[in-house]
Image (cartoon, rainbow, N blue to C red):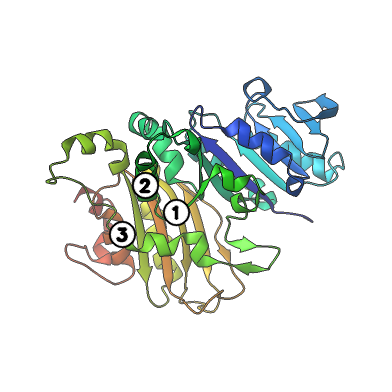
Amino acid sequence: MSGFPIPVSVLTGFLGAGKTTLLNRLLKDPALADTAVIINEYGEVAIDHLLVEQASDGIIQLSDGCLCCTVRGELVDTLADLVDRLQTGRIARLARVIVETTGLADPAPVLQSIMAHPALVQAFRLDGVITLIDAVNGNATLDAHVEAVKQVAVADRIVLSKADLVADPGDLETLRARLRQINPGVRLLDVGETKTGVAALFDCGLYNPATKSADVRRWLGEEAAHDHDHHDHDHHGHGEHDHEHAHRHDQRVRTHSLVHDGPVPFSAIEMFLDLLRSTHGERLLRMKGVIELQEDPSRPLVVHGVQKILHPPARLPSWPDSQRGTRLVLITLDMPDDYVRRLFAAFTNRPSVDTPDRAALENNPLAIAGR
């Protein structure tokens, strides 16, 4: 299909974070011409763009060629309708899709809709998740709502809004540090950095069609995440009970950076991913990985998953840099201590203390989960 796959960006953030303000600014940027914006209801989002021509079948065409459409039933139906309109000539060109979630939404179902449908994965690719955080109320929101923590945890870009309204600069730095601890691989921006252009928010995906290249380190957030394999740490025994209680949702989220030097058999990786998803898939918020396969080490395998949904693995034509091996970054919620590390060690033949041998694990895959 010519022009496919179309990049999809998911715009999320809790109530009052400023998604509507950012969305209106994005719609006016010439760089986002030929973009479709999917929102829940027009009444919930005040589009102050210049509306023109037609407003039918849930589609509003904007003056610069952008489209706005409501989610009619399922997101899958809306995306499929956009593809149909493009293929039948009712839309001349579609360069990008932005999906705005409701403020209370867990972003995982939206990501799954894009990644799991057999037809849509041919037409669309997930470019990235953009999460807005209200700098004034951000800490309180994260304390009160685990959904807000999930929105931070799965983000590729975090945009801080209303930073100029924060009275104490120390509070702002505390929030920034907290966001980086929840998601150490994320790129953190101030909303002011988006006013000069939208480039900083998009092209979060692995493959850049414009340059025909892949930036593995940036996509994985590896440099930031590599030292956070022990993000499993807790604050017990530090005497900071109030802090621990206030940030109880944060402690439920962990980032695991798994590295294995040298190639691994496809069967080992396949079984590792299958067991991880079957035993604790609901706790796997997001997973990214680049793998050196034993069967063909010259072409890296790229994997990307959300909870139990794994996007069809893709092969890059070659390694984008000199660093090979297997690199996986997983963000989990309420995952048992050491489960990911021990499971990965079992299938890469790097047993650690108390790691069951691989044959035993294959015969009883749930054994490790109970330890």
User: In the rendered structure, which disc, 3 or 1, sits on the residue that comes first in sequence?
Assistant: 3
Q: Which residue is mark 3?
A: 229
Quarter of the image for residue 135 reads top left
Residue 21 image offset from top left, x and y in percent: 62, 32
Distance Cα–Cα, label 3 vs label 1: 14 Å
Taking the image as shown, residue 176 lies to the left or right of residue 49, namely left
Which secondary structure lies at badge 1?
strand
Q: Mark 2 is on which residue type?
A: Ile
Q: Nearer the viewer, residue 322 or 282?
A: 322
Q: Residue at horizontal 74%, vertical 36%?
A: 81
Q: Nearer the viewer, residue 156 or 76?
A: 156
| Number of other residues with Cα within 10 Å of mark 2, as a class: few under 14, some 14 to 19, many 20 or more | many
Quarter of the image for residue 355 reads bottom left
Asked whether the beta carbons under mark 1 and mark 2 sit within 8 Å of each other, the answer is: no
Q: Nearer the viewer, mark 1 or mark 2?
A: 2
| Number of other residues with Cα within 10 Å of mark 1, as a class: few under 14, some 14 to 19, many 20 or more | many
Q: Which residue is mark 1?
A: 287
Query: Which label is found at residue 220?
Result: none
Q: Mark 1 is on which residue type?
A: Met
Residue 46 image offset from top left, x and y in percent: 67, 24
Q: Which residue is mark 2?
A: 182
Residue 180 image offset from top left, x and y in percent: 39, 50
